[in-house]
Amino acid sequence: QKEVEQNSGPLSVPEGAIASLNCTYSDRGSQSFFWYRQYSGKSPELIMFIYSNGDKEDGRFTAQLNKASQYVSLLIRDSQPSDSATYLCAVNMRGLLYSSASKIIFGSGTRLSIRP
Amino acid sequence: KAGVTQTPRYLIKTRGQQVTLSCSPISGHRSVSWYQQTPGQGLQFLFEYFSETQRNKGNFPGRFSGRQFSNSRSEMNVSTLELGDSALYLCASSLEQGDGYTEAFFGQGTRLTVV
């Protein structure tokens, strides 16, 4: 089982619609969760982080976390062509030697395409 | 505030050579992590350093090594390069307050091509 799993896509969504991206993770003790956006040829850019169960909204983006189900998602409302990118789910997992250490593991990413 | 700086941006090396990549984290960040990104494998965790100590390591061979200096700058070294080492190498820095809640910010990466 992969530590962080995402559907690779591509996910095609019409402009103006809601894009829904999903992610599951294996380490039940994980505490912090991130969504990164990566445009082709560029490095990942942090767009959202969430630490507590429930929803967290930031502009058109909403991150949702369910620790019991080990599931995190990202909703993008009013999708724009500029949202077309690969979205990476990342989880801060406990280190083997130092439980507080940063071991941020990424999923393989979901390619999102917003069609006009 | 300056972001994460990686040098060089591009590098071409021959099989069997060794290479050193550099990363300067955001000022005040003491945790530096390294990742390898390839089209087939995605973003793979290499290792993480904090206060000059390697705290976590991914599943890479011993040819991949790193270190961190007292000013938090980090270097990554790959010896005996193989064609499969061609990738984008990304460095991320985190504030790391020791409670597990920390965000990582990436540099622009070093594109390594092994020929």
Image (cartoon, grey):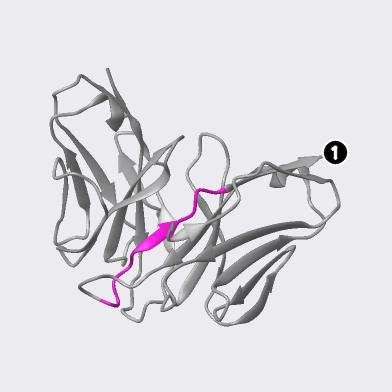
Q: Is residue A60 left or right of residue A90?
A: right
Q: Which of the 4 image quarters holds residue B40? A: top left
Give the residue at the far front of this rendering: A1
Image position, residue A36 (x, y; %): 54, 55
Looking at the rendering, the stretch of residues picked out in magenta corresponds to: A99-109
Looking at the image, is A56 positioned above or below residue B60? below
Q: Residue placed at 59% from the left, 82% from the top?
A: A53
Q: Is residue B108 left or right of residue B83?
A: right
Q: Residue placed at 13% from the left, 34% from the top?
A: B79
Image position, residue B35 (x, y; %): 34, 48
Q: Residue placed at 28% from the left, 70% from the top?
A: A95
Chain containing the residue with disc 1 = A
Q: Label 1 belongs to which residue?
A: A116
Q: Is residue A6 magenta?
A: no
Residue closest to the eye, A66 or A58: A66
Q: Is residue A106 magenta?
A: yes
Looking at the image, is A93 positioned above or below residue A86? below
